[in-house]
Amino acid sequence: MVDNRKNFQDTKRLFRAILALENEEECAKFFADLCTIKEMADMAQRLQAAEMLLQGKTYEQIVKSVKISTATISRINQCIQYGDGGYRTVIERIDKQQNEEF
């Protein structure tokens, strides 16, 4: 029980750290310190796959474009279909920001 509470507190602290970042440069520096290059690339690929799924792309199209496994795409799709909406929220906000920049 104590371990779960500590893990929860550690996770909350990580989320607060991310939310404390003020711009893309700070974000890049923090994630460069926090993650390996491979971990960042994997997260970026997952976001790209989620965007493509939300655009109605097929698994085959995503595998060819993003170079990730169908198992990973399936997990992302499960999150989109039955998860808490994290991918959708972030992608909608990114799209909105990009539209406002142009």
Image (spheres, rainbow, N blue to C red):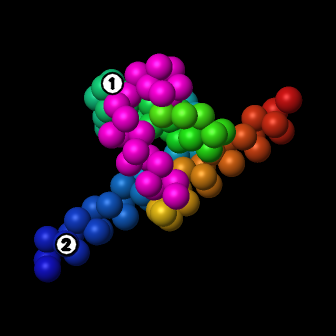
Q: Position of residue 41 (x, y in %)?
A: 39, 27
Residue type (three-letter) at the residue carrying disc 1: Ile
- Tell me the SS state at disc 1: helix
Q: Tell me the crowding category of disc 2: few under 14, some 14 to 19, or many 20 or more residues within 10 angstroms, Cα based.
A: few
Which residue does the image show at 40% across and 45% down from the upper left?
74
- Which residue is most to the left? 2
Asked whether 47 falls inside the magenta stretch, the response is no
- SS label for mark 2: helix
The magenta-colored residue range is: 60-81
**Residue at (38% x, 28% y) in the render:** 68
x%, y% of residue 87? 54, 50
- Given residues 67 and 43, the one toward you in this image is 67
User: Which circle marks residue 87 in the picture?
Assistant: none
Q: Position of residue 96 (x, y in %)?
A: 76, 44
The quadrant in which residue 89 appears is bottom right
53 in relation to 83, above or below? above
Dominant secondary-structure state across the stretch colored magenta = helix
Image marks 2 and 1: residues in contact by CB distance under 8 Å:
no
Q: Residue at x 36, y 55 (%)?
A: 14
Q: Give the quadrant of the N terminus.
A: bottom left
What distance separates the C-alpha of mark 2 from that of mark 1?
28 Å
Q: Quadrant of the C terminus?
A: top right
Q: Is 44 on the left or on the right of 70, as rendered?
A: right
Disc on res. 4: 2
**What amino acid is at disc 2?**
Asn
Q: Is 7 on the left-hand or right-hand side of 39?
A: left
Q: Is residue 79 magenta?
A: yes
Q: Is residue 51 visible?
A: no
Q: Which residue is mark 1?
A: 37
Quarter assignment of residue 99: top right
Q: Is residue 8 above or below residue 1?
A: above
